[in-house]
Amino acid sequence: MSAPEHEVDKRKCRMCLGGHRAIEGVHYNRIDADTHVSTWVTIKLQLSLTNLHRLQLEAFYYVAAYLQAELKDPLYVNPPTGLMQEIGQDPNKMCKLNKVLCGWPPSGRIWFDKVSTWLHNYGFCTLGNSGTFMMLDLRDLPGVACGMIILDLYSDDGLGSTDNSALWDSFMVDFKAAFIVLEKDPVYFPRCSIEWDPITGIIQLHPEKYLLEIVAKHDMTDIHSSPIPLPACRKIYMNEDGNIYEIL
């Protein structure tokens, strides 16, 4: 909802699996729940290489990422209360999931395996011991296909660096044919303001810029902050004048 008009911009919902009820060793194995995660080490390394070699910075994100991956094993769940009645089905029926949902412990691993397998088959090679940091090296090829792409995957986002925009465009055409992907400005990858000057190659990180814009967007400039983590038994009240006070 946008202020001050207070009009609904869009409606969103997320159906999550009650994975907190899953028991390790019974419903899934620990190794199936572990997945590669991008770190600031690889992100800063990529930004440094982008600066050093004057590469072009790109970014993208997957639309409903987990729903683009298929479950490896059958999984049956109880539907949300009221859903079956809403669609005119027997409320005692169970659902068999075909796609991955948030909340299921192995979901992240299943999704990453699908994306990384496709990228490796496309020609990307993993850099170092980080499964999320990859490179497509086509500098020995003649013509417009010559060049390289450095890629770092961050859950449902991706940060790319390339020395050939035509090569990046060709890659994105093939990538979008396999996944539902939208390109975006790399300024907020991952949830951090990246200021990149393509002329000088200087890259700066300003995470506070993203936070301040979120606060202003949702009209939270006058919020009352509380200690994090909030001490046990701490209660926060607002009186009729709108003043907030705390009681131990």
Image: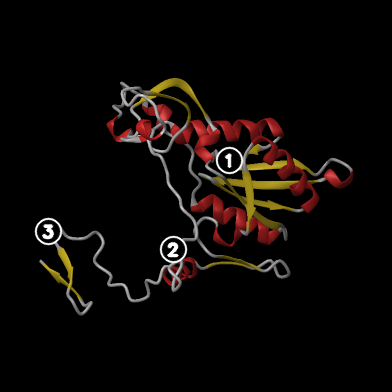
Q: In the image, 204: left or right of 84?
A: right
Q: How many marks?
A: 3
CB of mark 1 within 8 Å of CB of mark 3?
no
On the image, numbered disc 3 is attached to which residue? 233
With 128 as the anchor, is 201 left or right in this view? right
Q: Can see residue 177? A: yes
Give above or below for 93 relative to 117.
Answer: above
| Nearer to me, 30 or 170 | 170
Q: Which residue is mark 1?
A: 128
- First along the sequence among labels 2 and 1: 2
Q: Which mark is residue 112?
A: none
Mark nearest the camera among 3 and 2 is: 2
Report the residue at 15% width, 63% height from top: 235
Return the residue at label 2: 1
Mark in front: 1 vs 3:
3
Per the image, label 1 sits on a secondary structure element best described as: loop
Q: Residue at x 44, y 74 (%)?
A: 4
Residue 150: percent from the left, percent from the top? 66, 47
Locate the N terminus and report the quarter of the image it occupies: bottom left
